[in-house]
Amino acid sequence: MTPCIIFIFGCLVYYAAADPPNIILIFADDLGYGDLGCYGHPTSRTPNLDLMAARGLRFTDFYTTGAVCSPSRASLLTGRFQTRSGVYPGVFYPSSVGGLPLSEVTIAEVLQSRGYVTAMAGKWHLGLGPNGTFLPTRQGFQHFLGVPYSHDQGPCKNLICFPPDTKCYGTCDVGETLLPVFHDEKILQQPVNFTGLVPLYQQFSKEFIQKAVTDKKPFFLYYASHHTHYPQFASAQYTGHSLRGKYGDSLLELDGTVGELIKTVWNMGIQNNTLIIFTSDNGPETMRKERGGSSGLLKCGKSTTYEGGLREPAIIYWEGKIKPGVTSELASTLDILPTVASLAGAPFPSVTLDGYDLSTLLLEGKKSPRSTFYYYPPSIDPTRGIHALRMGKYKAHFYTQGAFHSETTPDPACHITALLTEHNPPLLFDLDTDPAENYNLLKPVIPKELEPIVKEIQNERERFLKSMTYAESEINKGKDPSLRPCCNPECTPKPSCCRC
């Protein structure tokens, strides 16, 4: 690794980077490609993310693997498609029996092997299970403060939104237990006080960073924000300060958290040895209209395999190490584990990884080793496999399907009424010139000059289908109401009595 650079009393000092870099991974929720100021939104206030983009590397072609929460988080933490871990179809619920298998190796476990201290704050959504079987503390995180699943998986009437006298927008899961906050494996709050939740996360994160630095330990912090998932909320500091209403306020609080974390890094003097990664799990819920985020120029949103469902904002920042700029190189959440492992000098897991080491792209400006990407829908069917494939600038759709989460947009292809349709030959789009996927290059017939690329794409699809292993579905293992977390387990009637 190259040496780190720091300033002491105005003097430039070099020291050997035998010390592995600290890692902060910030994961937004349901954030659209067009939601940030630095990605072109005209009224979003995201000054900290915009500054991070200006000082770091901003990606234009960065993908998540799942168009809904749980699958994308499984891939992020393991560097493997969700099919390999069985985190499909759909998402986990409070009463789900399954979870991310303990046999999977997470980023936290990889970095622990290199002597890192590890912590997570925020949304887990990879299973709870009997006696907390699948909590982050069982998956390589030494410390955890957060919610085991999505914050809409509980009664909205008990969710404190903005001024306490304001009713929440929507119904959410009214039959579920009140939403808990866990500290490690014990319930700290039930129900959650949402107006104070993000400040609680921030304090936890800052104290973790400060202690790690004091103890002279490299650290890994995974900050999985609830923002900007519906229903939106924000603390008093951010309420009413955005031109985008409640969605904008929650986005502003997310941006404020990014600012607080970066400020802490600089205050501790570790900016030259800290890698900060920001991205999101999937595209926006356009069905929520003004409360659902923006895909920008991309087609559709959450739960679809169009670009708006899986292409995400992504910014990677390392002061003095990563040259600021914008890159159109292909990259994915799958690539984070191998990249971080490489930079930390940690061994790769002894399993099949679907990600690539991007360290030479980040540190030397070289081309990405990734040239293809594979698009899975939320309801994965192993007999069909991927719905689309990107090779270089070309994207082929073998199946298309609209989704409930992508309702309300003018494009009928996004809606739930757009039923699953097979395409043979596939739909083909040039994403360099047509990122909105408006113009099928193979209609009405395949142009002769495109025949080679179509054949190459079809061959790659066949190769990928043969190489992929589909684990038994963890989500289809069913539900057990007794698994819903309750801080007062002897109380009745459940779930409404679960308060502490």
Image (cartoon, grey):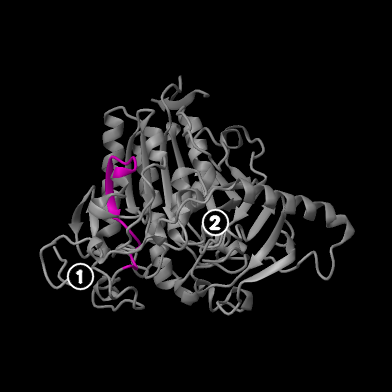
Q: Name the residue under label 2.
A: 312
**Disc 1 marks which amino acid?**
Pro
**What kind of element bears circle 2?**
strand
Q: Mark 1 points at which residue?
A: 495
Does the CB distance between marks 2 and 1 fall below 8 Å? no
| For residue 202, side relative to residue 287 (left or right) | left
- Where's residue 439, x and y in %? 75, 68
- Where's residue 314, x and y in %? 53, 50
Screen quadrant of the C terminus? bottom left
Q: Which of marks 2 and 1 is in front?
A: 1
Q: Is residue 411 visible?
A: no
Residue 398 in the image: above or below residue 57: below
> Which residue is at a point 48% across and 49% down the rendered structure image?
75
Residue 33 in the image: above or below residue 105: below
**What kind of element bears circle 1?**
loop
| For residue 500, side relative to residue 332 (left or right) | left
Determine the image quadrant of residue 235. Answer: bottom left
Which span is picked out in magenta?
138-153
Q: Nearer the viewer, residue 288 or 355?
A: 355
> Which residue is at a point 57% across and 77% down the rendered structure image?
415
Q: Nearer the viewer, residue 41 or 388?
A: 388
- Where's residue 168, x and y in %? 32, 76
**Disc 2 marks which amino acid?**
Glu
Q: How crowded is mark 1: few (under 14 residues within 10 Å), some or many (20 or more)?
A: some
| For residue 282, side relative to residue 496 (left or right) | right
